[in-house]
Amino acid sequence: MIPVLSVCMIVKNEEKVLNRCLDSIIGIADEIIIVDTGSSDNTKKTSFDYTDKVFDYQWNDDFSKARNFAASKARGEWILVMDADEFVDRESFITFRNQLQDRLVKENIFFVQIVNFLGEDGRSTSLNYHERLYRNDGKISYYRSIHELLKHENGVEIRGKADLQIFHSGYMSSTVNEKNKSERNLQLLKSIKEKEGIDYYFLGNEYYSLREFDKAISNYKKGYQIKENVYFEWVQKLLIRLIHCLHYTKKDQEAMDIINSCEDLFSNTVDFKFLKGKIYANEWKSGEAIKIFEFILNNKENLHAELSLDYLEQLPHRFLGELYEREGKFDLTVFHYSRFLALNENDDEIWTKLITLLANHSSKADLVQFIQKNIFSRTTMTAPRFLKILLASHNIEVQRLVIEFDFENQLTAVEQEAAKVKYMFLQKEYNLVADTIDRNMFEYLNALLLTNIFSIIDLLLLTLKLNHQKYKTYIKQLNLNPKVTSLLNLLFLNKRVKLSESEVTVFIELYKQTVALQDEELENLFLYKKSLMLNDQRMLKREINQLIKDKV
């Protein structure tokens, strides 16, 4: 009897993720074919734990050739292509495999939805569709050395979309950095002699992942100029990513021009509407932004997302919470932050915003009760994480809640010590904090700072308040990231300097904590330091005016 489904994989040094992938398909796929292109870790050993169909292949900088070699070993009626850093939901995969067996289909190539986890922790996602499932009749094969596509030898491709999601963690920052994927991909893409529009799209994507946005913009524009058809799937994605790049490089008018032209072409695509709302929000055009995000939420059933499902509901709720907070509409702000957190409880910044908002409008007893019932009791909430949520607030009463909850069994000894020192600092017992640090030497201070409970922001403020020369020397010797050399010259030496963008962010955080402490001497000192800055003062003025408004 011919097997229904063969899963084909090419792998190299994937021991960290391979078990997760194979555990998700073992016993459901009829056979698993694994082609190893030169692993030096335990990838092959792990592979043999799941299948005896493990083959060696000499890598030659061509993904299609490797995939076609794997397919040559498969006996299933259908081939599903997966990578080691991918996995499926087992129950969904069982349904998918059974439907594949029972249905009569005319299609011979199917797109599968790939859900990509992004960033440091995978809390955000993006979507795309790849040709991953095809009939194993010997007539369909991959071509292109990278970002490979399928073709039929007689040009008889009948495409469809399969009801299957594959989850992909390979675009998380740690994985991308560890495996140097972008550099490898750029080398392969640049080696293509006669480039098509889609090649420039893929080149743009690699520069996008490296945050080299000007190069990404250049390649996206080249790809769009030589496209064959505006309705090719990759063209729409190219336009969305181009808008992102233009926004990141502060070219919002050009981004808006593209959005306006695309809304008619792709009227049901939420990405363009979402990005327009985001640009309006960043331009402080709150009314226009609110209308767009409310429209998305009210019409999400009739819209579809190209790059991220978060654009349909999760992120509109987040933006609406922030926009209504700007306008002082308490009930609407709480509603949208709560709806956002119901969809993504891992966003610590919004937990901080919600707790701060409730602290400003309720008693301490009510706030503690809300936290115990809705936040601290969550299985995903650890004590160190919860402390950092509290301490990220710029409401001093929220920060002082660090001593309100029993963390004894959930914090290390160093974390407990850092919480005690932090509370002394919040009580403005500056000399007592300095005495505690000085008694224990700088190794003690190093350990406190590593917890980020007593933070570098606190130490900088303590140093300025006490004009502590030893702390100044200590801070200058720290290998701080981002670099803050100009900021330290401003703070410690009263030099007139222009701060980098990251240094401006740190300066604002310092001032926010100063306002939270309600230390008038430090506030006046920071207003003086601000006058020495050679930067454009508009963003600083907006932030400071908002802090003054919040104080009142």
Image (spheres, rainbow, N blue to C red):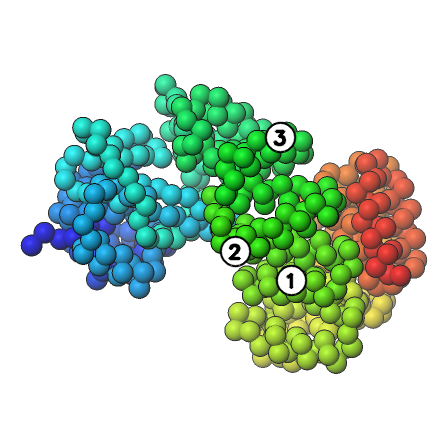
Q: Position of residue 118 (x, y in %)?
A: 49, 49
Say whether marks 2 and 1 touch (CB < 8 Å): no
Q: Nearer the viewer, residue 52 or 206?
A: 206
Residue 337: assigned label? 1
Comes first in the chain, label 2 or label 1: 2
Crowding around mark 1 (Cα neighbors within 10 Å: few <14, some 14 to 19, many 20+) is: many
Residue 123: assigned label? 2
Query: Is label 1 in a helix, a strand or a loop?
Result: helix
> Residue at position x 63%, y 36% from top?
247
Query: Is label 3 in a helix, a strand or a loop?
Result: helix
Residue 64 lies, with reference to residue 298, above or below; the image says above
Q: How far apart are marks 3 and 1 (CA)?
A: 31 Å
Q: Position of residue 410 (x, y in %)?
A: 58, 76
Count of numbered circles on the image: 3
Query: Is label 2 in a helix, a strand or a loop?
Result: loop
Q: Label 3 belongs to which residue? A: 257
Amino acid type, residue under disc 2 in the picture: Arg
- State which quarter of the image contains the N terminus: bottom left
Comes first in the chain, label 3 or label 1: 3
